[in-house]
Image (cartoon, grey):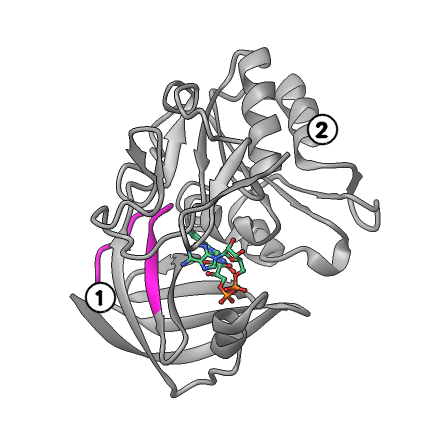
């Protein structure tokens, strides 16, 4: 079933990324996503980036036709959505360290606001850092990492995670970001003996586990995920290696 919601506010997070807030009474958990109907173009998955009672949000990076069209929306415009879908993060996994890379930060933000856990936000440069204001309002410790060193730690999310895990006491890392980041984060967590829950992305059409488009081994990313823990990830042979495009063709990451 789909719902029509009215956009109440639009926040510019970065030069290419905007947050759209709307009132939607559906029960949603941190880490879940919704499907956004973009008339005449596509229907695309978006993480729920904010959960404040009935007020929810999505945070969209404009990269192609559908996301650019969403960026044209202004308060008062309507959005047709389906969901929420997916399992979401398990917030009862002990002392948590949240990690968002690029627009993947949007997917972990509801978990940050729900727990106030320590958070790393990683981006290419200062201009690409998003949602650090929200994280800072909820967490005592928010660290920024930029690839070019223009803000915070000069390096990537995995390097900073290694430092913070060595300094602090964490039981589990919760992360979303580019798959290359998640792949090396998973490897680092295995090496450091710390659990992780990673939110994965695959091409999705139905979002509800029916079409089989996002299958990886015997898991449907939309229905059994998008969040997977160490044990589940260890069985996903395509993780960090390849994904499928809109026609089901295999595309190699490396
Ligand atoms: C569970 C999930 C949560 C996501 N959350 C966010 C989010 O919070 N913010 C955000 O900006 N982006 C998010 N994305 C990615 C977003 O769905 C794609 O960037 C978007 O669909 C691109 O559409 P486009 O027409 O603008 O670009 P296009 O030019 O059509 O595509 C650009 C790239 O986006 C990916 N993509 C395109 N269509 C889909 C699709 N139907 N399903 C999955 N990937 C697709 C492909 O890798 C493609 O190469 C999420 C993806 C998934 C699977």
Circle 2: element type: helix
- In this view, the residue in front, 171 or 244, is 244
| Residue 31 included in the magenta stretch of the image | yes
Measured in 3D between alpha carbons, the distance from the residue under mark 2 to the one under mark 1, in whole angstroms, is: 39 Å
Q: Which of marks 2 and 1 is nearer the N terminus?
A: 1
Circle 1: element type: loop
**Residue with the most extreme bottom position:** 76
Q: How many marks?
A: 2
Q: Overall secondary structure of the magenta stretch?
A: loop
In the drawing, does residue 44 fall left or right of residue 145? Answer: left
In the image, what residue occupies the spot 22% across and 72% down?
3
Can you give x and y, in whole percent of width and height, for residue 160 in the image? 70, 31
Q: Is residue 60 above or below residue 93?
A: below
**Dividing the image into 4 quarters, which one contains the N terminus?**
bottom left
Kindly identify which residue carries mark 1: 25
- Dot in front, 2 or 1: 2
Q: Is residue 174 above or below residue 34?
A: above
In the drawing, does residue 48 fall left or right of residue 138? Answer: left
- Examine the image and state in which quarter residue 139 appears: top right
Q: In this view, does 254 lie above or below 169?
A: below
**Label drawn at residue 36:** none
| Residue 128 included in the magenta stretch of the image | no
**Label drawn at residue 159:** 2
- In this view, the residue in front, 227 or 56, is 227
- In this view, the residue in front, 44 or 143, is 44
Q: How crowded is mark 2: few (under 14 residues within 10 Å), some or many (20 or more)?
A: some
- In this view, the residue in front, 243 or 234, is 243
Can you give x and y, in whole percent of width and height, for residue 114 in the image? 39, 46
Q: What stretch is highlighted in magenta?
A: 26-36
């Amino acid at each position: 079933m789909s719902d029509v919601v009215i956009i109440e506010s639009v926040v510019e997070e970065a030069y290419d990324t905007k947050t759209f807030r709307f009132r939607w009474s559906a029960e949603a958990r941190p880490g879940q996503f919704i499907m956004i109907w973009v008339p005449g173009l596509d229907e695309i998955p978006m993480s729920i980036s904010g959960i404040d009672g009935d007020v929810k949000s999505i945070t969209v990076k404009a990269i192609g036709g559908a996301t650019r069209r969403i960026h044209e929306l202004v308060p008062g415009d309507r959005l047709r959505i389906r969901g929420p879908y997916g399992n979401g993060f398990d917030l009862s996994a002990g002392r948590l360290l949240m990690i968002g890379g690029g627009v993947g930060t949007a997917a972990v933000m509801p978990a940050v606001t729900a727990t106030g856990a320590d958070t790393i936000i990683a981006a290419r440069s200062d201009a690409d850092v998003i949602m650090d204001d929200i994280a800072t309002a909820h967490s005592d410790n928010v660290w920024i990492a930029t690839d070019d060193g223009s803000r915070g730690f000069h390096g990537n999310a995995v390097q900073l995670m290694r430092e913070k895990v060595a300094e602090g006491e964490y039981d589990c890392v919760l992360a979303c970001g580019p798959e290359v980041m998640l792949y090396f984060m998973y490897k680092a967590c295995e090496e450091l003996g710390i659990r992780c829950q990673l939110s994965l992305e695959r091409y999705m059409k139905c979002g509800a586990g029916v079409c089989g488009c996002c299958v990886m081994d015997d898991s449907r990313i939309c229905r059994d995920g998008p969040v997977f823990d160490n044990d589940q990830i260890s069985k996903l042979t395509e993780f960090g290696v390849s994904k499928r495009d809109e026609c089901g063709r295999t595309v190699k990451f490396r």
